[in-house]
Image (spheres, helix red, strand yellow):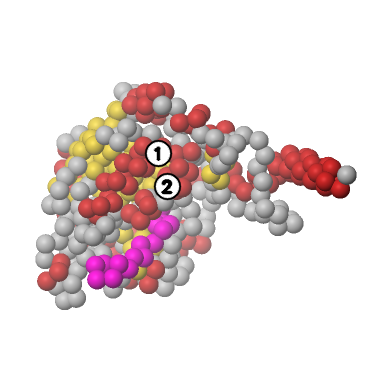
Amino acid sequence: SVRRGVGGFAKRVERRGQKTGRRRGNVNLNAAANNNTNAGGDVITVPGSIPGARVPDPVSDPRLTNHPDGKVKVALCQVVVGDDKLENIETMVSAVRHAARAGASLVVLPEMWNCPYANTSFPEYAEVIPPVQRWGESSESKESSPIDDDVKSKSKLEFESASPSVTAVAAVAKETGVVLVAGSIPERDALDADTLYNTCLVIDGDGKIIAKHRKTHLFDLDIPGEVYFKESDTLTRGSELTVVDTACGRLGIGICFDMRFPELASVCCARGASVLIYPGAFNQVTGPLHWELLQKARAVDNQCFVLTCSPALDQDALSKDPPGYQAHGHSSAIGPFAETLGTCGDTPTTVFAELDFREIVRRRKNMPLQTQRRGDLYAIVDRTNTRLRGDKC
């Protein structure tokens, strides 16, 4: 009788917990998506099955079905980076112009293309970046912010002098009409000069900055006797994920070390990104082993395109005092079935590839991972989803 009594009590507790979970599930689910907890600090529980195992429900890139011809030509500009910022800018402009002349409508630059990849260089080469203006948004529709006011208070000449890299990428995008994923540069916070970020800009064909991604996972690595680098010694990590609508489709942006985190890629694709783009600068130790592997893993995980762009290898880096950083190179375009659409070695070059968005539709139809995910067993929660704030993506 004691055993029956204990068993009955356990069942009653279980049923009560299930009812409580059903009753509070929607509230807790919304709290999770908004990066909040409930008033009692309870563990968030999500009863039942979650569509696509994603919170909130995943969406698709509208360009998958309404793109004029379903294809986009991309260019990955693997440029050499030196100590002279103005020379680096000239190299970048030349590469983008060459890509546009060759017919590319989406152009990608490397990580830290305007400066040597070194903690001592980041403060010296850092620039203030003006606010983002969403694709298709008029400047009159934006509300003023302290950063807006700070930028407006400077004359155009003052800003161009203080931020020549930002000025140059906006100008060459407008000149050529391409969508430019402008690699990354060190960004100085407009309101706090001591705060630096590793920042990627996305610029449309009108020369407007339509997205800004601050690297969310900083490159802190210590492999004794092989490689040591800690971005966190000088840089601050970003606090948001970046998905942006462009004329070339909906893009998810990460920077280098961000590619090691499949959750970031999954959330970007759940927001509808059909192309994941990672400007990066893997080193000579991890690059040969992980660079291609991670690109293909992210592509297969999400059945999307993955683009990476690295600086070229600096052959003289190790002879400098102190020794410089040597990038792995091998910028690549990967398809949704892990096929290599374009790649290169470690020398300066431009990789061209064609993205056929119909391939995403075909691969997802042939292998419907989205409907096969076990949303009753697991789910990824997007805690900063912009749709919940009324934005486009």
Residue drawn at 37 percent across, 42 percent down: 298
N-term mark: 1 or 2:
2
**Are dots 1 and 2 in contact, CB under 8 Å?**
yes
Q: Quadrant of the N terminus?
A: top right
Against 10, residue 87 (above or below) is below
Tell me what residue is drawn at x 26 percent, y 46 percent. 292
Task: Please give the name of the residue rendered at 33% of the width and 54% of the height, measured from the top-left corner.
Answer: 256
Three-letter residue code for mark 1: Asp
Please, what is the three-letter code of the amino acid marked with disc 2?
Pro
What stretch of residues is rendered in magenta? 211-229
Residue ranking furthest to the right: 1
Single out the residue that lies furthest toward the front: 1
**Residue 224 on the magenta span:** yes
Residue 142, horizontal then vertical, whole percent: 51, 48
Mark 1 Cα-neighbour bin, 10 Å: few <14, some 14–19, many ≥20: some
Residue 276 lies in quadrant: top left
Residue 231 image offset from top left, x and y in percent: 35, 67
Asked if the stretch drawn in magenta spans residue 310, the answer is: no
Label 2 sits on residue: 262
> Going by the image, does 4 lie left or right of 160?
right
Residue 344 location in percent, x, y? 16, 45
The residue labelled by disc 1 is: 301
Q: Judge whether 200 appears above or below 243 on screen.
A: below
Q: Residue at x 34, y 24 (%)?
A: 358
Q: Name the secondary structure under disc 1.
A: helix
